[in-house]
């Protein structure tokens, strides 16, 4: 009886382990679906350059705070302890003592800049402009990530759509091959039509394999951009925007230019960098002027003379006898330091002039980007309309030619030509559709208004 119970328990344990393994295998093999917005979110979370620039933004924020506090008083506390062995002047006795003297010093000092040629004021403004420039760089880098992920995601969707078209074409070719085989056996079709159709099937199989490989390669690139394991298989959710959603209303190029000049983060970054360089130039030039600062110091000391019978206590010496308080103003006038200040001023002036050139170049590039995006969108819109008409025409032509072929009026060459034209029209329409979607996003990218919320 005991052996039976042990055997039952052992078998139940095996069944439990088997169920766990089956459940685990099912969860691992489960196909994950990646949506468009989730892909963009993952890209923003994992992008290397974006995360690095966010870290630099924290650094520039600390620099700005530090530059602001540089204009406030600086306070420090110092102290020392030690022993003199030999002749030393003892302040407590007012005489030279020969022997061992233990001492403890302590002090508090403060310094307040009053005037230094507006050096620190301009340095703070420079740090604030650098922080603002870095913030705009983070914004533009975010838009770069959205654009890149969108392009790769839509490319994968296009590959997915083209694969479906090629697979449907393959199934159609196989069905047509079976039909021609029956007709050849009945003697109503020439055997050459059968060979021709077999060639069309092999060509469709090859095209389907190539489309599948292209989809796998592009999905691997997307996984690399999102920094996810490319071995993990995932599906892409279809984007159903509708024609009206990715058709932009009639826009005026001048309005897009105005919008871009107001919103482009890279142009703001260049302007802030130019301003920071100008303030740095003014800050360095402030070193030509005299500097005035206020200072205050409070010090005290304790001495213990070994062998002396009349050493006063620590409290008496440190709190009363040896306490000192100094304060006043300090003036420094630069006269000559080997042209070090002049070299710094010239270097900063060159940086300022180069920053001005960069700002002008960025403004020209912004207008050029808007013009290119506008023209490409108009071209994509016309191409979409043409591809839509071509698809309707190709579908109608193929249906008519198929009916003619089934009735024996047309030959295999005419049917193949019509079918190839229809497949090409399907591919061109899919390509034009996704191109138009992406060009709409590029309008927002060129004007600097692209956001995560724009992703459906």
Image (cartoon, rainbow, N blue to C red):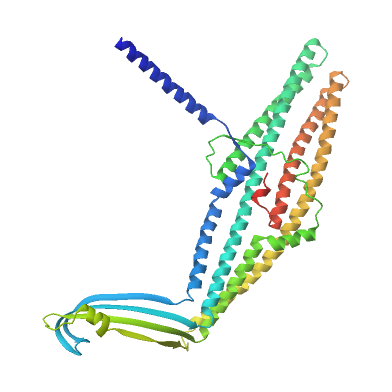
- Asked if 203 appears above or below 126 in the picture, the reply is above
Query: Could you tell me which residue is drawn at 59 percent across and 46 percent down?
Result: 41
Residue lying at the far right in this picture: please name it. 409
Q: Tell me residue 437's x, y (percent).
A: 72, 45
Residue at the (53%, 74%) spot, across then down: 123
Examine the rendered structure and indicate whether residue 70 appears above or below residue 89.
Answer: above
Instruction: Place residue 81 in its image quadrant.
Output: bottom left
| Towards the viewer: 199 or 271 | 271
In this rendered view, identify the residue nearer to me: 344 or 71. Answer: 71
Left or right position of 441 against 219 = right
The quarter of the rendered structure image containing the C terminus is top right
Expressed as whole percent of the image width and height from the top left, the position of residue 391 reads 81, 35
> Which residue occupies 83% across, 32% down?
394
Task: Please tell me which residue lies in front, 139 or 367.
Answer: 139
Residue 312 at x, y = what percent?
18, 82
Tell me how many marks there are.
Answer: 0
On the rendered structure, is 165 left or right of 116?
right
The residue under the point 67% across, 53% down is 450
Q: Tell me if 129 is positioned left or right of 113 in this view.
A: right
Residue 103 position within the rendered picture, expressed as x and y whole percent measured from the top left: 21, 78
The quadrant in which the N terminus is found is top left
Q: Is residue 199 visible?
A: no
Q: Is residue 341 visible?
A: yes
Name the side, left or right, on which 403 lies relative to 110: right
Q: Is residue 15 above or below residue 273?
A: above
Quadrant of residue 83 in the image? bottom left
């Amino acid at each position: 009886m005991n052996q039976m119970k042990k055997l039952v328990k052992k078998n139940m344990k095996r069944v439990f382990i088997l169920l766990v393994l089956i459940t685990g295998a099912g969860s691992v093999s489960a196909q994950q679906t990646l949506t468009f917005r989730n892909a963009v979110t993952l890209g923003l979370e994992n992008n290397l350059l974006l995360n690095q620039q966010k870290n630099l933004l924290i650094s520039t924020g600390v620099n700005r705070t530090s530059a602001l506090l540089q204009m406030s008083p600086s306070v420090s506390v110092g102290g020392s302890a030690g022993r003199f062995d030999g002749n030393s002047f003892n302040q407590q006795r007012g005489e030279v003592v020969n022997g061992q003297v233990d001492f403890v010093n302590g002090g508090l000092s403060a310094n307040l800049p009053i005037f230094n040629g507006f050096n620190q004021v301009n340095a703070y403004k420079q740090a604030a402009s650098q922080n603002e420039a870095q913030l705009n760089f983070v914004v533009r880098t975010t838009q770069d990530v959205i654009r890149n992920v969108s392009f790769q995601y839509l490319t994968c969707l296009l590959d997915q759509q083209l694969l479906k078209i090629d697979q449907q074409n393959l199934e159609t070719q196989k069905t047509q091959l079976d039909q021609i085989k029956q007709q050849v056996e009945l003697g109503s079709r020439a055997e050459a039509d059968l060979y021709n159709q077999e060639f069309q099937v092999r060509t469709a199989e090859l095209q389907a394999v190539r489309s599948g490989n292209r989809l796998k390669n592009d999905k691997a690139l997307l996984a690399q951009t999102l920094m996810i394991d490319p071995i993990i298989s995932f599906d892409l959710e279809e984007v159903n925007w509708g024609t009206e959603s990715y058709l932009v209303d009639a826009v005026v190029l001048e309005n897009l230019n105005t919008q871009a000049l107001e919103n482009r983060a890279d142009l703001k970054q260049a302007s802030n960098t130019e301003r920071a360089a100008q303030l740095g130039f003014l800050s360095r030039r402030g070193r030509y002027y005299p500097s005035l600062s206020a200072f205050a110091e409070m010090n005290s000391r304790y001495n213990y003379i070994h062998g002396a019978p009349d050493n006063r206590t620590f409290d008496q010496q440190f709190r009363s006898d040896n306490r000192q308080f100094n304060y006043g103003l300090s003036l420094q006038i630069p006269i000559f330091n080997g042209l070090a200040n002049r070299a710094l001023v010239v270097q900063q002036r060159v940086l300022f002039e180069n920053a001005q050139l960069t700002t002008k170049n960025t403004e020209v590039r912004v207008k050029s980007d808007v013009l290119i995006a506008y023209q490409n969108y108009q071209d994509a819109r016309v191409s979409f309309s043409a591809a839509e008409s071509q698809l309707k025409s190709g579908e109608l032509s193929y249906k008519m030619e198929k009916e003619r072929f089934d009735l024996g009026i047309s030959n295999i060459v005419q049917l193949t030509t019509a079918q190839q034209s229809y497949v090409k029209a399907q591919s061109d329409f899919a390509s034009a559709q996704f191109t138009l979607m992406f060009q709409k996003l590029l309008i927002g990218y060129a004007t600097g208004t692209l956001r995560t919320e724009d992703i459906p």
